[in-house]
Image (spheres, coloured by chain):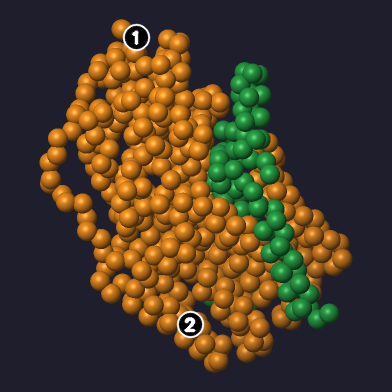
């Protein structure tokens, strides 16, 4: 299998995984899920680092370094803000309330 | 580092991302899922500094890693900007921050591809150039579009659809320009064509989002998020980086599904939202200056209404969040509950600015989760409800969504508060809501209006309740 075809296979299979993984989500989690997915595409950071690493002139280096900064903001900021959102959903200290909220959300969110 | 080990660790990171998305789709595991994703991303970032020579140096004669210090400084700078922004942002402004993060991600992906394209020069294969073209177009659209959504949500610019005469022809022409310049890039592979294409794509991104009305903005953010994912995947193809392809595609695919789910939750057709740009016509704005009688009341009147009710439903909206009145509203609800009144919160799926946004805000104020009732469950209970208290919400209770075909929110499911015995609106003014449409319910005889800042009004109602 040629390299290009191998990459294409990975692409196609990833599409199906992506569809499958989030097929049913309660509306409550739409925002955190979007934000989490947003953080994951911050992984472009490793692409930015790779091109910065092998830049052969100043223009390339400048563009790549800007990309590193932007990608870092996307990734780090994305995970932090998602965590802050989800912090709000943790079970309350009061046990009765906590148990109630857990089951209530689970009913809403499970397939 | 050994190539096989490097690729194997890359696979582990890809699995971490899949588990992260899986975890985020269920409330119990959401937080863990996010942490797994963050862990995977950290591992991947450290790993890339130890990339095998053949990856790090493809196309260069020299050996060893270059610019490592500069890269580390850039990362540190990104962290210094990103983390405080994410930590300090008010929960009410979260949607625009997500939009902004998404935009910079798209911009980064476009820059990565441009850099690689400049480097490859004449040695680029046609497949590389096609992937680059895709990345630059979609990355630029995502970047420009996200900036516009940010401006709209931050209310720096108008939240209404921006439509100008002949707008759809301008948009169509820009799109055609993007495609033609894409062909030009693929054909002649120069730097000028790429620059032209990039600029036209930015313009298209702006034009694409301008006609989107306030209520549809979250859907567009989600869509641009999916776009950025695909951009990352395409740049992964250019760089031959499997992990970028997997992660980008996962986000692209799950983002598309999520966009559709959101659109369904809001009762919007995805197609209508997206191509609203091509079909939107300038709408007649509600006649300004027209004065119609409304019934406004004092905090004491409201307190009396609430005090003698059997069942009260609170409908919180973005106005509540802006006034930071979550805690006061909970105090009032606790008072009413103590008096034996049945209190519930009716949560519209898009209350706030995004699906689930209001749940986050109320959870922050320690409102018991079981009092938060979703729209489908609360709607049948309105006829048995004595008083509905609408705090800083407007569009989500606007009957125009049912009765006025052609208005921007037509078809959106609403909370059926008109069925209740009394409706109290807490509003700052008669100004229409985010979608910019008049609400007939305000003129209904059973509606009482309490003007003022939501927190102020609620505080007064609370003290009036205590005195009763």
What residue is drawn where x is 33% and y is 66%?
B280
The residue carrying mark 2 is B179
Question: Neighbour class for label 2 at 10 Å: few (<14), some, many (≥20)?
Answer: some
Q: Nearer the viewer, mark 1 or mark 2?
A: 1
- Give the residue at mark 1: B466
Report which quarter residue A109 is drawn in. top right
Quarter of the image that includes the C terminus of chain A: top right
Q: Which of B10 and B356 is in front in this view?
A: B356
Mark 1 residue element: helix
Residue at position x 53%, y 68% in the image: B139
The chain whose colour is orange is B
Q: Position of residue B62 (x, y in %)?
A: 74, 78
Secondary structure under tag 2 reads: helix
Measured along the vertical axis of the image, is residue B143 above or below residue B323? below
Quarter placement of the N terminus of chain A? bottom right
Residue B275's tag is: none
* Label 1, label 2: how far apart the Cα atoms are: 66 Å
The residue lying furthest to the bottom in this view is: B188
Whether residue B15 is situated above or below residue B393 in the rendered picture: below
> Nearest the camera: A107 or B210?
A107
Q: Give the image location of residue B32, x and y in percent.
A: 70, 40
Tag 2, which chain?
B
Rendered location of residue B4, percent (x, y): 87, 66
User: Which residue is located at x 25 percent, y 60 percent?
Assistant: B283
* Badge 1 or badge 2: first in the primary sequence: 2
């Amino acid at each position: 299998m040629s390299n290009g075809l191998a990459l294409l296979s990975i692409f196609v299979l990833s599409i199906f995984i992506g569809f499958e993984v989030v097929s049913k989500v309660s509306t409550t989690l739409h925002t955190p899920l979007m934000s989490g997915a947003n953080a994951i595409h911050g992984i472009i950071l490793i692409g930015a680092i790779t091109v910065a690493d092998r830049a052969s002139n100043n223009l390339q280096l400048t563009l790549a370094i800007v990309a590193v900064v932007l990608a870092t903001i996307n990734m780090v900021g994305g995970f932090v803000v998602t965590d802050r959102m989800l912090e709000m959903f943790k079970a309350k200290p009061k046990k009765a309330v906590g148990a109630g909220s857990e089951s209530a959300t689970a009913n809403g969110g499970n397939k | 580092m050994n190539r096989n080990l490097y690729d194997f660790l890359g696979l582990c990171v890809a699995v971490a991302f899949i588990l992260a998305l899986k975890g985020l789709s269920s409330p119990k595991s959401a937080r863990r899922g996010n942490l797994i994703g963050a862990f995977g991303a950290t591992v991947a970032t450290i790993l890339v500094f130890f990339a095998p020579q053949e990856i790090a140096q493809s196309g260069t004669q020299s050996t060893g890693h270059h610019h490592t210090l500069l890269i580390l400084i850039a990362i540190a700078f990104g962290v210094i900007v990103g983390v405080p922004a994410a930590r300090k942002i008010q929960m009410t402004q979260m949607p625009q921050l997500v939009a902004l993060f998404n935009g910079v991600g798209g911009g980064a992906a476009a820059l990565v591809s441009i850099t690689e394209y400049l480097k490859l020069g004449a040695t680029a294969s046609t497949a590389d150039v096609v992937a680059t073209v895709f990345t630059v177009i979609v990355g630029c659209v995502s970047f420009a579009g996200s900036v516009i959504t940010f401006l709209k949500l931050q209310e720096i610019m108008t939240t209404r659809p921006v439509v100008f005469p002949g707008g759809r022809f301008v948009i169509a022409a820009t799109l055609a320009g993007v495609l033609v310049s894409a062909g030009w890039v693929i054909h002649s592979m120069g730097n000028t064509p790429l620059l032209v294409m990039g600029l036209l794509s930015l313009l298209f991104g702006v034009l694409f989002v301008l006609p989107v009305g306030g209520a549809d903005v979250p859907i567009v953010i989600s869509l641009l998020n999916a776009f950025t994912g695909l951009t990352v995947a395409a740049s992964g193809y250019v760089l031959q980086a499997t992990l970028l392809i997997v992660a980008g595609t996962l986000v692209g695919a799950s983002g598309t599904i999520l966009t559709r789910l959101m659109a369904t939750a809001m009762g919007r057709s995805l197609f209508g939202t997206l191509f609203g740009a091509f079909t939107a016509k300038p709408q007649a704005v509600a006649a300004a200056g027209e004065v119609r009688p409304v019934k406004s009341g004092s905090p004491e009147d409201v307190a009396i209404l609430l005090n003698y009710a059997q069942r009260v439903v609170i409908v919180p909206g973005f106005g509540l969040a802006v006034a930071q009145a979550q805690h006061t509203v909970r105090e009032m609800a606790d008072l009413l509950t103590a008096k034996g009144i049945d209190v519930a919160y009716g949560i519209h799926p898009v209350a706030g600015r995004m699906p689930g946004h209001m749940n986050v805000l109320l959870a922050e104020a320690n409102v018991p989760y079981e009092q938060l009732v979703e729209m489908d469950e609360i709607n049948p209970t309105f006829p048995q409800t004595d008083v509905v208290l609408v705090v800083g919400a407007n569009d989500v209770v606007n009957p125009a969504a049912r009765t006025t075909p052609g208005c921007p929110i037509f078809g959106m499911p609403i909370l059926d508060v008109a069925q209740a015995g009394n409706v109290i609106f807490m509003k700052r003014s008669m100004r229409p809501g985010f979608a910019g449409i008049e609400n007939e319910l305000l003129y209904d005889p059973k509606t009482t209006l309490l003007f003022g800042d939501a927190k102020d009004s609620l505080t007064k109602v609370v003290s009036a309740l205590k005195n009763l």
